[in-house]
Amino acid sequence: MKSTKFGKYGGQYVPEVLMPAISELASAYESYVRKNQDGFMDDFFARLKKFGGRPTPLYKAERLSEKYGKEIYLKREDLVHGGAHKLNNALGQCLLAKYMGKERVIAETGAGQHGTATAMAASYLGLDCEIYMGKKDINRQRPNVFRMEINGAKVNPVERGSGTLKEAINETLRDWSKSVDTTHYVIGSVVGPHPFPKMVRDFQSIISQEAREQIQEEVGRLPDSVVACVGGGSNAMGAFYNFLQDDQVNLIAVEAGGKGIETKLEGRIAHHSASLTIGREGVLHGARTKILQDEDGQIVESHSVSAGLDYAGVGPELAYLVDEGRVIPRTIGDKEAIEAFFLLSEMEGIIPALETSHAIGYLENHVEGDLGEVVIVNLSGRGDKDVETVMEESHRLGIKNRTTDRVGRGI
Amino acid sequence: MKSTKFGKYGGQYVPEVLMPAISELASAYESYVRKNQDGFMDDFFARLKKFGGRPTPLYKAERLSEKYGKEIYLKREDLVHGGAHKLNNALGQCLLAKYMGKERVIAETGAGQHGTATAMAASYLGLDCEIYMGKKDINRQRPNVFRMEINGAKVNPVERGSGTLKEAINETLRDWSKSVDTTHYVIGSVVGPHPFPKMVRDFQSIISQEAREQIQEEVGRLPDSVVACVGGGSNAMGAFYNFLQDDQVNLIAVEAGGKGIETKLEGRIAHHSASLTIGREGVLHGARTKILQDEDGQIVESHSVSAGLDYAGVGPELAYLVDEGRVIPRTIGDKEAIEAFFLLSEMEGIIPALETSHAIGYLENHVEGDLGEVVIVNLSGRGDKDVETVMEESHRLGIKNRTTDRVGRGI
Amino acid sequence: MSIITDAFGEGPILIPYITAGDPNEEATIEYVAALVRGGAKIIELGLPFSEPIADGPVIQEAINRSLEAGMTPRKFFGLVSEMDHGVPIVVMTYYNIVYQYGEIPVESFVSESVRCGINGMIIPDLPIEEAEVLLEICKENGIDLIFIIAPTTREQRIEKIMEKVSGFVYVQARLGTTGIHKDVSRTTHESLERLREYDIPKSVGFGVSNSDHAAEIIKSGADGVIAGSVFVDIIDKGREEGIIEQDTVRLLEEKARELVRGIGEGIENNKS
Amino acid sequence: MSIITDAFGEGPILIPYITAGDPNEEATIEYVAALVRGGAKIIELGLPFSEPIADGPVIQEAINRSLEAGMTPRKFFGLVSEMDHGVPIVVMTYYNIVYQYGEIPVESFVSESVRCGINGMIIPDLPIEEAEVLLEICKENGIDLIFIIAPTTREQRIEKIMEKVSGFVYVQARLGTTGIHKDVSRTTHESLERLREYDIPKSVGFGVSNSDHAAEIIKSGADGVIAGSVFVDIIDKGREEGIIEQDTVRLLEEKARELVRGIGEGIENNKS
Ligand SMILES: Cc1ncc(COP(=O)(O)O)c(C=O)c1O
Ligand SMILES: Cc1ncc(COP(=O)(O)O)c(C=O)c1O
């Protein structure tokens, strides 16, 4: 059997009842994904193209480039069907479920991005679909709930605990424990037990596969840096993967600094989601990785203004790459992210997702030497979904600009 | 000078103060758009690709094809940046404004689709942008208002009259009358005085240019029919244009039948927006075309559940093509459109715009002989924006299905 | 020469505009009478169209009020038939109204206009390029078709327009739509300058609201002063503030008198 | 042989589970005493982890209550040290808790466990493949590491697991997580059948809530009955409905007694 680890990270820390399913999945991954059995990957790529809208452009942000005196390219995952890179993975896994003869998929979702992507892919492939979502998140993200339901998925509210992503994951794992025979669990990022981190990475690596070719067409050489935001880490791994062997390319993983990573733990609450930057090794949701936890090993509630980055763990491969020094972890806080949200919207006519805004914000707030001259930022998703949140949070954080002013005037 | 007309339709029925601007625009159109002066069209196509995300896929809807026993292909304009074909035109006009040395663009918007597209394009090209929008529409479409403002546009509420699209157009024309020297008016569809109908058509004809090649790659021949919804007619003209010379291809323009086109005028109110089907020749907003009007020539308030189709006029070229028998006008009502909205969402994982749902609904409710075996439906836009409306209207119209049931249960 | 051109015979004149049927038909008759008492020599009467793209907010609201009160082209013609104030009447409306009236497009409207004693027409959304049919029919029927010259209109177009226009030429004082403004725009002088060579009365409108405006316009060489929004505003305020009808009538007459006084001052000034 | 295996020496036994610190530490000591009075022969004590992915809603809530009341691994060990009921104690927790405790990952946790008189461990998120380190340290410290066999576990894995397991093997009665169910699942019989050849006590858990369940499990050939949610539920209801502490203690003892009675019936039945 192939290794389930990345150095000391990764592995398969799951209840025994799930082990057979995980092993079955690992073999399916080896044969269909790694070895293109039955032309699986060809089928996947064809569907990504027709259904997903790939390839996505690599777009030179002229006005941003001028502002920062660098050549800034945006990889336009916001143009993927559904509005984010999430579909690359959801489509891959749903298709794999179909090849494996499963009739039903389940998934967790926080902000609803992965849930909507899964619901779309399942509907497209004719699979039954149930999504677990915290009650609190459901109330915050009603339009996404409607979208999932309209795509024919059943959305199961998780009432327990804080009613957010963590509980939704726990609940989805519980469903899977009961339903492994017929059901595939579509995990939403490069997290969870092997083979998920590798598999999700492979499905997302289309991002860097395209971008690596595109940048060479554009500037005739590799970029100096690739910047991506990190929640679980799927868009970052997708954007980094095909550049891993290019040592001259800096790979910058931007985490949610929230209200600041210096603020101390209060009870089991962190004011950020910077697991790569200051997380401690541990085991969460099936994998050994870097985690935000208290002294005893209890997982803390993380924080970010962006729901998609608000997670106490991170993909094990990223943890490994950070330890190896190949990936540089950085943080951008709530305020800087919102400012970047406005900046890109006003200067380039693209409203980025709040998650993505963290990567954009790194252009303004970068560490000297990180970026170089030619920069690719992975524009992981669009921000229609975040418009209301940004308006509220701008107000709370005292961010003032033309837009917030105007809305203040009540138009 | 080139003809300003399509048969008896079209022309330039505008106040004298605008005539010079219109003439200037007509020459700019001739040189930049028709003759590719300064490489304008090359620039436009390159930007459509990088900024807009073109080409869009031509997607075989497998499950829909099976259901209807036809080969149904969807032209995926929902994947264009902003979520609809509207950007093709907004980008073209904003770029032309820039080539013409204008610093400012203005636009009207109803549901906000054209407004958001214009705001995006203007922000991208560094143009000042003001959008006129009826007060009532502003209240109905707050997220779109935020999006425009976030992209740096100023949204001017139009308080007068019914506070909808018609008033917004009048008000934008008034602004233009004052500001013609520095300002370009970005009209949102193939309507208005010459050269707008031809120019918008040319910018949108990229749709059929791509689709005509794509369908031949897919099936080795031309389609039997192309179906598109019609508000002003820009997505329809874009989807039809390169098939006009192919007599064997039926071109079906689907208008909003609303509550039924049989229902009689009440005062100055129509219960549909079927100007092509039952409109009478007249002059509206700068062009001679088919119009919904009362006996005296007063324009009536049209109706459609879909804001983007809710217009009493229609592009003059479509009026001409209908008279010539080249384009077949049909109608689909509110209820059928909403049913089609659910159908596509559940069967193909694509939530269509309510406008687009009228075109989809024609598959279920077509006239014998119209469609043939190979059908292209222009998927003009995505329906995220319509989710709330559909939920409310389903309830009002008594449409029952899994989704509406569930939402009824209060999730 | 037409009756309209004749009206300019005794020196510069006032041409007020009001919307017919705002707020009702009877009132319109009284208002027109008041304006004539106040010194108006031509009356421009608005026949409402639901999409008045060339008009500003003040007149747009008047049009809405008139339509809501039930005004139609047929009633409009009835109303004009009843009038007998001894001054020429010019109808101002939009082309769709002209086109849709009666059995024969355009022709029915023109012949009915003539029958009712209308002497001229202003169709602000009908530029010279689209006006061929209407021009011909107007000519046949001996009715003047009045065109607008805007500040943006260039020499070549001016020539084309001046070839066809009859009655008088409507000089648009500024960019934009109808409405009340604080001063007379610089462009007024320039526009009149450009038209000096043409032998047809020139009336300046768009934004005229007091005697100073009127005086300045005449000083600049105009033959007529057109004022609309200022009168419509008086009608609207009267309605809104519940001012009794007779007060509105008096205020209209006074405003007309004021503008006529301004015109007089302009003439004096010209002479000196 | 281990103390735990010894506990099965006199025939099939009851192994109740409760969460330590739910609702507080003092109560836990009393509850354990009651369960032992009721006939429990091994106690499975939950050390709470914030993400109990192998547990159902009932136990998850107990864990949350315990955490909110301030339970920590350190306090847990203190609590166990105080206990002296004459039955082996098995700690049930998740791997991160084991890993994070003390100076040396895993080792600190195990040696502290031994020091406090803990005899075995169940770590439901630690499958055999990841258990190498813990297995070794447990062996060195003479503590049993108990593994679960699920209905989905296939022959090959069973062999691997049975090679390493000690104390007893935990047979998961059904798919899913812990919780109360109406009947004993068919898979119980099949699972036990598959394990018949192995010479180690087999205890069946997941969903046992009354004497009939217990009887049936024993009839199927099990050596022990594990019941958790049914006890946690009693503790929760007591708290919720404001039942006085002594009543909860009595109800726990009675439920244990009922299950022991069921076990007895199962044995009778086996004999007949
Ligand atoms: C647009 C976007 N970007 C980034 C993320 C973060 O996830 P990941 O780190 O797996 O890419 C999300 C998660 O919802 C997202 O929606
Ligand atoms: C998605 C979509 N389709 C169609 C239309 C109708 O416009 P047109 O007929 O110009 O394509 C609109 C208008 O907003 C739209 O948003």
Image (cartoon, coloured by chain):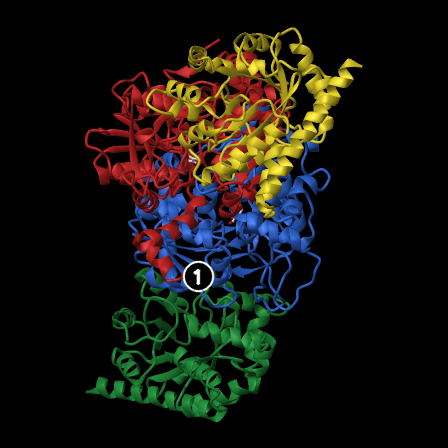
Chain colours: A blue, B red, C yellow, D green
Amino acid under disc 1: Val
Q: Position of residue B396 (x, y in %)?
A: 35, 53
Q: Is residue C143 above or below residue D46?
A: above
Q: Position of residue D164 (x, y in %)?
A: 41, 67
Residue drawn at the location 37% of the way across and 17% of the way down: B8
B107 or C174: nearer the viewer: C174
- In which quadrant will I find the C terminus of chain B? bottom left
D132 or D86: nearer the viewer: D86
**Does residue A34 appear in this view?**
yes
B405 or B295: nearer the viewer: B295
Residue drawn at the location 49% of the way across and 91% of the way down: D244
Residue lying at the far right of the rendered structure: C272
- The residue under label 1 is A14
Residue drawn at the location 69% of the way across and 19% of the way down: C187
Q: How many marks?
A: 1
Q: Position of residue C200 (x, y in %)?
A: 60, 10
Q: Is residue A401 above or below residue B31?
A: below
Query: How busy is the neighbourhood of tag 1: few (under 14 within 10 Å), some, or many (20 plus)?
Result: many
Q: Chain of mark 1?
A: A
Side of B15 relative to C267 (left or right): left
In which quadrant of the rendered view does residue B349 lie?
Answer: top left
Q: Position of residue A308 (x, y in %)?
A: 53, 51
